[in-house]
Amino acid sequence: MERVPILKLGEILLVSIQIDMEDQVALQLQEDLAERIVATRCHGVLIDISALDIVDSFVGRTLATIASISRVLDAETVVVGMRPAVAITLVELGLSLPGIRTALNVELGMELLARDASFDFEDAASMAVDEAVDEP
Amino acid sequence: MSDGERIEVGTDQDVVRVRQLVRTVAVSVKLSLVDQTKLVTAASELARNTLVYGGGGTVEVARVDNGRRRGIQIVFADQGPGIADLELALTDGYTTGGGLGLGLSGARRLVDEFLIDTSIGRGTTVTVTKWCR
Ligand SMILES: Nc1ncnc2c1ncn2[C@@H]1O[C@H](COP(=O)(O)OP(=O)(O)OP(=O)(O)O)[C@@H](O)[C@H]1O
Ligand SMILES: [Mg+2]
């Protein structure tokens, strides 16, 4: 069985799906990614589907599951590169992928994840300030 | 219907082969890119149902011509348990298998013609057609 490679790129994991995945391959990716998130402590996952010429309900559900698992493991998932014909078909199929964040390409996806990371940082910083003010 | 091609569906890998065959034929009859994508997606859903619920079966892909337009017809046939309540099975979100319940209802929206013939204990045959515009 083929396997979809997962690359670590700085602080994020990049998954570029280049094959027409049989269902088992998609499920394997789900597991591999969960393990890699924990092992690398990455907070961002970028899934590039620009090479996919269809996304059916199985792959759609797999993407949604990956996004949920990542969130539980403190990582954000962004799906990038969906082709226009795939988007049209997905919506007509009835799959609007709620809960999945998307961006048009890898670069924009990375920006989105970077923005998230800096927000987290600011939140943490302002909380630290609040605590300092509370000190008697 | 003209000379069709047939795939036995017994594994995940066969579902991938169905997608690839449908794509090839869709390109050869010159369906638009969006229509190719819709048809391949519908075929993927229906072939998976044949595998998962029908216990495997066959998929036949053929070029068709009604005198005015060319198109593709695909027949998914299994000898599985059949579908007891067809109306329910065609409802968005209905599943007995932990899926999203979008396969049948979604596939119906993605094609031009959609026919189901099912009988309990005998099996299910789904026939879909997509015409060139
Ligand atoms: N070939 C078949 N033989 C027997 N039952 C079937 C067949 N195809 C579909 N069904 C029944 O119809 C239900 C709905 O099918 P549908 O493809 O819409 O959803 P699903 O396969 O459960 O989920 P999804 O396709 O969204 O992953 C199935 O759960 C199953 O009970
Ligand atoms: Mg299904």
Image (cartoon, rainbow, N blue to C red):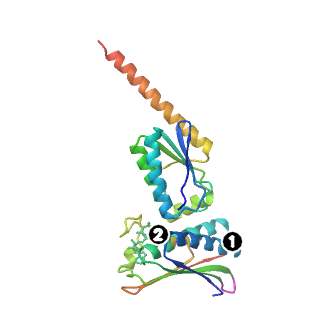
Residue type at mark 1 is: Val
Residue placed most toward the observer, A89 or A70: A70
User: Which residue is denoted by mark 2 in the rendering?
Assistant: B103
Q: Which mark is residue B63?
A: none
Q: First in sequence: mark 1 or mark 2?
A: 1
Helix, strand, or loop for circle 1?
helix
The residue carrying mark 2 has its beta carbon less than 8 Å from ligand 1: yes
| Res. A98 in view | no
Q: Position of residue A92 (x, y in %)?
A: 53, 64
Residue type at mark 2 is: Gly
Dominant SS of magenta comes to: loop
A85 to B117, vertically: above or below: above
How far apart marks 1 and 2 lie (CA) works out to 23 Å
Q: Position of residue A98 (x, y in %)?
A: 45, 53
Residue in the picture at 49% in, 58% down: A26
Binning the other alpha carbons within 10 Å of mark 1 as few (below 14), some (14 to 19) or many (20 upward) gives some
Asked if marks 1 and 2 fall on the same chain, the answer is yes
| B81 magenta-colored | no
Residue placed most toward the observer, B105 or A76: A76
Q: Which residues are magenta?
A: B64-68
Binning the other alpha carbons within 10 Å of mark 2 as few (below 14), some (14 to 19) or many (20 upward) gives many
Q: Position of residue A33 (x, y in %)?
A: 47, 49
Chain under callout 1: B
Helix, strand, or loop for circle 2?
helix
Assign the C terminus of chain A to one quadrant of the image: top left
User: Which residue is denoted by mark 1 in the rendering?
Assistant: B27
Chain under callout 2: B
A2 on left or right of A35: right
